[in-house]
Image (cartoon, grey):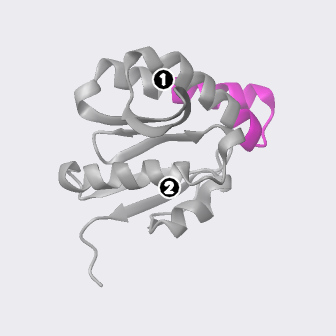
Amino acid sequence: MRVIQQASFRDISDIIALTGRAIRTCIDEPSDIQDGLIASCADSVMWWRAHPDLALHYVYRIDGSVVGALLVKEYWNLSNLFVDPAYHHQGIARQLINKALEECKTRSPKQAVHLNASRYAVNFYQKLGFVPNGEPRDLPGGCFPFIYKFNQSP
C-alpha cells in the first residue's frame, strides 16, 4: 500500500536514514561534503521537531516503510525533499510536491514556495512549474534558487 501521511516524531530516524541514502547516491561530492549535507538536512528535521506547527512534513510510505519525505518550513521554504534511490522515477516526489503545494497555497505568507535545488533536481522542479529565482550559488551539490508562485498571472 502507498500512502502520503504527515510525518511523526517516530519517523525521524527513518527520514534521516533516507536522506543519507539519497545524498550518497545522487550528490557527486566527497564523503565529508556529503556528511555535511546530511547533517544540514538533519538539522532541518530537528527544527521541525521543535516547531511542528510551523511546517508541513510529509512522508511517503510503501507497505509501511518510509521511502520519501518532504519538509516545508513556515509553509514557504521547501528545505528537504528526498526519495529513496530505489524508488526514483515512480512519481513519489511529484506526489509529495503536489500535496505540499495544495496545502501551502492557503498558508504561505509569501504566496509562494521557495527552494534551493541541487544540480540533480533542476529539471524536475522546472517541470513542476518552479521558475528560477536568482543566481545559482557554487555550493556542494549545487544551489539553484527556484520559486513557485501561487497567484501567477497567465
x then y, percent, for residue 22: 67, 36
Establish if 141 lies above or below 38: below
- Mark 2 secondary-structure assignment: helix
Would you say the magenta stretch is mainly helix, strand or loop? Answer: helix
x then y, percent, for residue 45: 44, 25
Q: Quadrant of the C terminus?
A: bottom left
Amino acid identity at mark 2:
Arg
Nearer the observer, 73 or 136: 73
- Between the C-alphas of marks 1 and 2, the distance is 24 Å
Q: Going 31% across and 48% down the picture, which residue do you hit?
A: 76
Amino acid identity at mark 1:
Asp
Q: Going 75% across and 25% down the picture, which residue do you hit?
A: 32
- Mark 1 secondary-structure assignment: helix
What are the residue bounds of the magenta stretch?
A: 23-42
Establish if 52 lies above or below 119: above
Q: Going 71% across and 40% down the picture, which residue do you hit?
A: 86
Q: Is there any visible trace of residue 55 in the rendered image?
A: yes
Q: Going 23% across and 50% down the picture, which residue do you hit?
A: 108
Residue 27 on the magenta segment: yes
Query: In this image, 115 relative to 31: left or right?
Result: left
Q: Which residue is mark 2?
A: 94
Q: Which residue is mark 1?
A: 43
Q: Quadrant of residue 19?
A: top right
Query: In this image, 93 relative to 149: left or right?
Result: right
Which is more N-terminal, label 2 or label 1? 1
x then y, percent, for residue 117: 56, 52
